[in-house]
Image: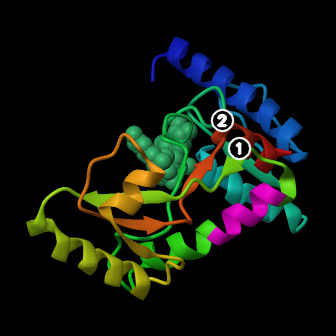
Amino acid sequence: MAKSKLEDYSLRRRKTLKHTIRSFKIRISSISTSSTPREKADCVVIGAGVVGIALAREHALKGREVLVVDSASKFGAVTSSCNSQAIHVGIYYLPNSLKALFCVRGRNLLYSYCSEHGILHKPTGKLIVTTSHAEILNLYQLMNRAAQNGVDGLRMLEGFEAMKMEPQLQCLKALFSPAPGTVDVHSLMLSLMA
Ligand SMILES: Cc1cc2nc3c(=O)[nH]c(=O)nc-3n(C[C@H](O)[C@H](O)[C@H](O)COP(=O)(O)OP(=O)(O)OC[C@H]3O[C@@H](n4cnc5c(N)ncnc54)[C@H](O)[C@@H]3O)c2cc1C
């Protein structure tokens, strides 16, 4: 690595470390003045997206010194701040897959966490609609799959019932799930770092 690039890298890493110290109250036992910083910690988490921050929080709450490093200069700089902020509930995933298991459990945990920590969130519910007779069977199959995954509160609605809920909608049938919602991801990440 060219010297200037190395210095730049080192500076960015130190900025990240300062940030980390504030966020997770991490004690950095040694920050080298040479171009290769050295620090000590019980755990190092690489990546300060929502997953990395959540992991770091878990470790920090258990009393461990946690160091979070990221190539970006701030937390949540990549996917975690550019997503749709939807709370998914596991309707589509293959039954018994890890995605299905984690999504259903994670949704409950996320709603509880948001309520406990005053994070803006809203269970908006979701309508999955069909506009052709040929798709109706698919909708029932989706309902079965979601039920197998443990998604509760599902209802198959006639078109007129769904259209009452959403007057701009045109459909033949709709699968309604009350559980999906939205969350303010930025507040969520800030709270995880507090
Ligand atoms: C368009 C879009 C919409 C989405 N909508 C939703 C949604 O509505 N609901 C939902 O639940 N999920 C949604 N997702 C998925 C969700 O955003 C991701 O699952 C989540 O943000 C992943 O978090 P992460 O911490 O794993 O990754 P990231 O947020 O990408 O964080 C990874 C971090 O690691 C750092 N990094 C990477 N490589 C290195 C390295 N070698 N050295 C140092 N640092 C490194 C990056 O800089 C970054 O900060 C969406 C995704 C996309 C793309």
Residue stretch in magenta: 108-115
Q: Earlier in the sequence, mark 2 or mark 1?
A: 2
At numbered mark 2, what does the secondary structure look like: helix, strand or loop? loop
Taking the magenta stretch, the answer to whether it contains residue 111 is yes
Of residue 139 and residue 146, the one placed in the foreground of this image is 139
The percent position of residue 16, horizontal first and vertical second, equals 71, 31
Residue 3 can be seen in this image = yes
Residue displayed at 18% across by 56% down: 131
Given this view, does label 2 or label 1 mark the residue nearer the observer? 1
Q: Is residue 60 above or below residue 24?
A: below
Of residue 90 and residue 173, the one placed in the foreground of this image is 173
| Residue 187, quarter of picture | top right
Q: Within 8 Å of ligand 1, the CB of disc 1?
A: no
Q: Kindly indicate whether the residue at mark 1 contacts the one at mark 2 (C-beta within 8 angstroms).
A: yes
Does residue 189 appear left or right of residue 107 in this picture? right
The percent position of residue 145, horizontal first and vertical second, equals 33, 81
Amino acid type at mark 2: Phe
Q: Dot 2 corresponds to which residue?
A: 75
Residue 161, label in figure: none
Amino acid type at mark 1: Met
Q: Within 8 Å of ligand 1, the CB of disc 2?
A: yes
Of residue 150 and residue 166, the one placed in the foreground of this image is 166
Q: Is residue 145 above or below residue 47?
A: below
